[in-house]
Image (tube, coloured by chain):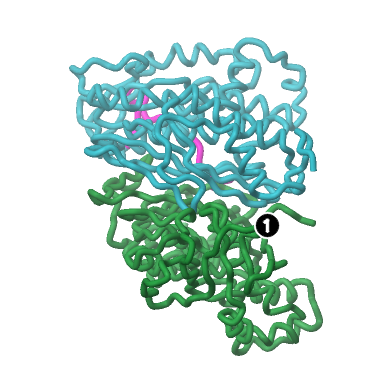
Chain colours: A green, B cyan
Amino acid sequence: MKVSLATRVGDLAEEQIVAILRQAYPAGEHPTEVENDDAAVITVTPGLRLVTSSDMLIEHEDFVFPEFSAYDVGWKTAAVNLSDIGAMGAQPTGLVMALGLGHDATVADLIGYARGVRDAVNELAPQVSIWGGDLSHARLFTSQATSYGEVAEPVTRGGALLGDVVAYAGLLGFAAAGLRILMGERTDDPDLRGLERTGAIQHAVDAQLRPHPPVSLGARAAAYGAHSLIDVSDGLARDAARIAAASDVTLDFVSGALAGRCADLGWTRHTLGVDPWELVMAGGEDFGLLGTFAADAALPEGFEAVGTVIERGEHGVLLSGRPTEYLGFDHFRHS
Amino acid sequence: MKVSLATRVGDLAEEQIVAILRQAYPAGEHPTEVENDDAAVITVTPGLRLVTSSDMLIEHEDFVFPEFSAYDVGWKTAAVNLSDIGAMGAQPTGLVMALGLGHDATVADLIGYARGVRDAVNELAPQVSIWGGDLSHARLFTSQATSYGEVAEPVTRGGALLGDVVAYAGLLGFAAAGLRILMGERTDDPDLRGLERTGAIQHAVDAQLRPHPPVSLGARAAAYGAHSLIDVSDGLARDAARIAAASDVTLDFVSGALAGRCADLGWTRHTLGVDPWELVMAGGEDFGLLGTFAADAALPEGFEAVGTVIERGEHGVLLSGRPTEYLGFDHFRHS
């Protein structure tokens, strides 16, 4: 049978599907010692420790077609998994991908997905190799990855110290704005239906479809002596609360330091009917890095001071000394 | 709010769900250095190499409710992932679990799932620890795990040598028979509807719901100098063909050596209308270990000689010198 871009996955043998994926995946700098066996074999650089994380994206929950393309799903799966490695202060080395897809998926979908993975790796962590994967049939497109990295001393959530500077690297609120635009179009919101995808609007949609976590800044933050580090997936306030809880401190954000980021999202008040502060404090999925550094230390380029670490009070997170109502996203609460 | 076994996941915060899972998970002998952070931190024993694998089970594809319970899904997810580590000749050390479930899942489901994971670990690889996980909302119950293990020298699919003894450890065909029973009942097959679940029939159903891969025999096979090793997930002939292809040899099974296993499944001819040879040669999901050993080497206890490695011919797999039509299961082919 001749295989074309329109060939359906249901007409291919598993080996053919794997071959199509492997061809498009990056080789990277850290090949596994054993390929295409029951498990990947990893060498850890002597003196360094291995970190590993796992994230799964499921159709209808984490993305929808056609707003997302298979390319976007591949990109985002790689990006969110690499982000978790950077957030330990580690250098990513490899990914193991698991993909579930239906008989009706096409060769074009497969290639699109694999290229999304490849391009995200090339842009965010070009040293990373794909170490293998698992292929399943699924009614819903299901994309999972396990990520690996190396670090001398991991930077955890629990190391923030009194007097630390709180610093952030990456976008804030754009991915959440992009999600509202995409969902508004899906529900045929008349205000969003005719929106021209220019400038900030396209930027926000792109941030949702293809986030750019500052993965390499994780290892740089570690080199600059970061005391604590986390990637912001569920909203700035919510992830800051995780550092606060693990470190038994309070993080006090300076509203003036975040005002510029709100100004950048000023258009959302009129266009989306949403408070830019809510996007900045509670919007998730930008996957920027939130860390704390000694007050007298230099911040690595890319990080911006946004607050200070103070003694643990009633609230783990404050905005210019006052409690904030923006508690961010919880996957499971649906009230 | 008071949390009971009937409390729905949609009424819990993510942290509560994670706490319920963690309480039920095993601690094992290999704790991660950092818990509850962006990524798990693993120490690899100096001189050993790390192996890692990933397998995903999705509702409607890999299992159905109520034939499977949440406990069974947890058990099977752990079992199939540990099996891949054993199949490298390695000793499993840890698991990272990812779970997707709907708002309507209950606390009883969560606890059942976690206990299934725990019991499989305790029975198959008690030294294993749970190193973390990822929780998603999903319309379909989706259970994924990444498994980790250590080995001095991995045993791959590609090491089979001319003259090797082909040996197998574990059940053959029972899980496939169990699947037919469960699916037959689901489709209201009158012949299967009234089947009493006694003896061999219950044994087959159990093999499907809660497979017992001989995980620890993997490291033992390595210690006995196994040349090649694979776990049989897609059928004996199909997985044997993988060793044959990777090693550029042919595996010739001795029908007499497998006849006893067919006799054990003799009841399936009448009860299920299926040829026992098809179950033995092409039935998957028993997750036994298929390996090749030097002809003059002792076989580790638990392994049984079932064939020999001969020069590569037209077919990678033979049954007493003749081609076999049993090519086994392919996830994607639906013709």
Above or below for A119 versus B201: below
Q: In this view, does B106 lie to the left or right of B213?
A: right
Image quadrant of residue A226? bottom left
- SS class, disc 1: loop
Counting from the top left corner in percent of width and height, residue B190 is at 77, 23
* Residue occupying image coordinates x 49% and y 34%: B80
Image quadrant of residue A66? bottom right
- Residue type at mark 1 is Asp
Counting from the top left corner in percent of width and height, residue A97 is at 46, 53
- Please report, as a chain letter, where disc 1 is located: A
Q: Which of A311 and A42 is in front in this view?
A: A311
* Residue occupying image coordinates x 72% and y 16%: B195
In which quadrant will I find the C terminus of chain A? bottom right
Q: What stretch is highlighted in magenta?
A: B315-335
Q: In this view, does A42 lie to the left or right of B12?
A: left
Q: Residues within 10 Å of mark 1 (few under 14, many from 20)?
A: some
Q: Is residue B54 left or right of residue A40?
A: right
